[in-house]
Image (cartoon, rainbow, N blue to C red):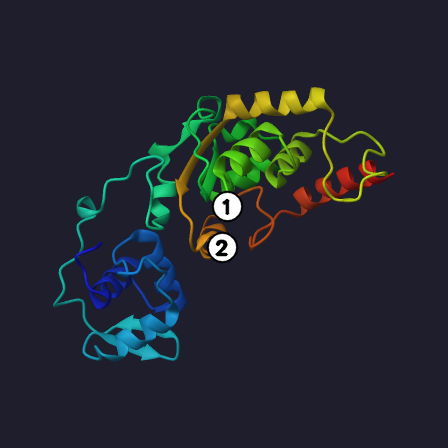
Amino acid sequence: MSSMTLHEAIHQVLIKHGGPMTTREIADELNWNGFYSKKDGSFIIPYQIHGRVKNYPHLFDKQGSVISLKSKTGIKPVSISSKRKLVSGERSDRKPELLMHEKNFKSASQIDELVPIDPGIYAIRISDINKLPYPFNEVLETRGHNIIYIGLAAQSLAKRMLGQELRARGHGTFFRSLGAMLGYRPAPGSLVNKRNKNNFTFPKSDEKKIIDWINENLLINWVVQKDNLNELESILIPRFQPLLNIAKNPSALNELTRRREECLQIARH
């Protein structure tokens, strides 16, 4: 747990930002950076920010939900070196930075024996954005990172992340989106006699090509976590706007939706 109190952490966030922030923005930043952690491990919410700044009128100015600093004195700036060391795959008390730290990612070709059966949240990066087809490579370049997907596994990371999303064992949303983006298409009419008309699949020969592409180009990290998975996903996806996330993503790509819809139409007829 951080040695800072909540009002000290709020103060540091506002100094770092350099201007006013809403209570939601402050809460999201604290849930991300780990400056302050609640004893019960739950997420910091905007109402807590609202309540705390009211107790320190000499430090903060509050206009509705917008918080700003009255003074930068009285609280020493936080040292970045004092933050907790991050370890790949470590069991986490919901620290998002543990998941997203670039040094913790491993090649998809090396994780089959490492992924646990526990629930958790995972992130996927691409090692070289130029391996993406146009216009996806240019979109990711404008976003200034190489994150292409963030997902959760409510029951098992081994089953959901590894099996369904990376190895085509079942119906993985990411695997379907990736295949559609790369130009693969399902067999015509392959969903005609299926009860579920949405879970299209690719021919086995194409699945193997997609898996080979995954192993060659993608980097994976995860954290084991049981609680607050949806809440954590709802913070990380809007923050990073991963290339292949559609749900919860304010910058979801119309081109990806179009290619997935094309796959559905081919498989349904």
- Residue 92 screen position, x and y as percent: 33, 45
Give the mark, 2 or 1, whose residue is nearer the N terminus: 1
Q: Which residue is mark 2?
A: 230
Looking at the rendered structure, which numbered label has been put on residue 152?
1
Quadrant position of residue 121: top left
Crowd around label 2: few <14 · some 14–19 · many ≥20 (10 Å): few
Q: Of residues 239 and 36, which is closer to you in this image? A: 36
Name the residue type under label 2.
Asn
Q: Return the x and y of residue 156 as percentages of the image width and height.
A: 50, 40
Q: Residue at x 35, y 57 (%)?
A: 31
Tell which of 147 and 18 is nearer to you: 147
Element under disc 2 = helix
Q: Are marks 2 and 1 in contact (CB under 8 Å)?
A: yes
Image label count: 2
Residue 110: x %, y % from top left: 44, 22
Rendered position, 81 above or below 23: above
The correct choice, above or below, for 116 with respect to 143 in the image is above
- Say what amino acid the circle numbered 1 marks: Leu
Residue at position x 20%, y 64% in the image: 5
Point 74% across, 25% down: residue = 203
Q: Nearer the viewer, residue 207 or 260?
A: 207
Q: Secondary structure at mark 1?
A: strand
